[in-house]
């Protein structure tokens, strides 16, 4: 049975493989494609509405238990379609 996680954007439960893991490193949000980076992670659907809701409600700050603002440029780039390529793929 696959582990189940809760999306911080829409608050619905889904299998781990259906969600993206996001971590904060030095107050910068990083999408953890392989779900292997150390530290606390937050899970979100790879959908515009879920990521937008999580950013708007400051859900990443609460879920990752960090203080202060987070740099959300990587998430916003992915929302705009620039971050879909992984490891230099074409």
Image (spheres, rainbow, N blue to C red):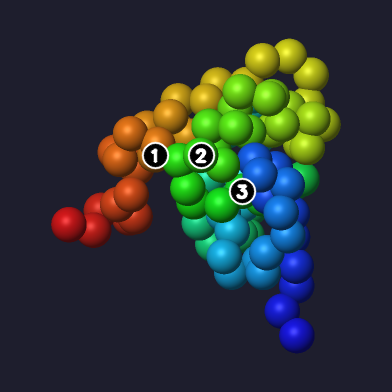
Secondary structure, mark 3, is: strand
Question: Residue at image x 71%, y 31%?
Answer: 59
Query: Which of the 4 image quadrants contains residue 35?
Result: bottom right
Count residues near mark 2 (Cα–Cα under 10 Å), then give few for <14, some for 14-19, many for 20+: few
The disc placed on residue 44 is 3
Front residue of 44 and 66: 44
Q: Is residue 36 visible?
A: yes
Mark 1 near mark 3, Cβ–Cβ under 8 Å?
no
Q: How many marks?
A: 3
Q: Is residue 12 found left or right of 44 in the rendered image?
A: right
Q: Is residue 41 visible?
A: no
Secondary structure, mark 1, is: helix
Q: Is residue 26 above or below residue 78?
A: above
Q: Is residue 81 found left or right of 45 in the rendered image?
A: left
Count residues near mark 1 (Cα–Cα under 10 Å), then give few for <14, some for 14-19, many for 20+: some
| Residue tagged 2 | 49
Q: Is residue 85 found left or right of 14 in the rendered image?
A: left
Furthest residue in direction top, as rendered: 68
* Earlier-in-chain disc, 2 versus 1: 2
The image position of residue 23, as x and y in percent, is 64, 42
Quadrant of the image for the C terminus? bottom left
The image position of residue 88, as x and y in percent, is 25, 53
The image position of residue 12, as x and y in percent, is 71, 54
Front residue of 11 and 33: 11
Front residue of 73 and 9: 9
Q: Is residue 81 above or below residue 5?
A: above
Count residues near mark 3 (Cα–Cα under 10 Å), then give few for <14, some for 14-19, many for 20+: many
Question: Residue at image x 34%, y 55%?
Answer: 86
The disc placed on residue 20 is none
| Residue tagged 1 | 78
Question: Residue at image x 75%, y 85%?
Answer: 1
The image position of residue 32, as x and y in percent, is 55, 51
């Amino acid at each position: 049975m696959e582990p189940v996680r809760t999306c911080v954007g829409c608050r619905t439960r889904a299998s781990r493989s259906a969600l993206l893991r996001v971590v904060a490193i030095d107050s910068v949000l990083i999408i953890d494609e392989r779900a292997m980076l150390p530290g606390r992670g937050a899970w979100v659907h790879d959908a515009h509405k879920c990521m937008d809701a999580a950013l708007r409600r400051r859900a990443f700050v609460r879920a990752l238990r960090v203080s202060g603002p987070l740099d959300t440029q990587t998430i916003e780039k992915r929302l705009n379609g620039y971050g879909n390529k992984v490891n230099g793929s074409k």
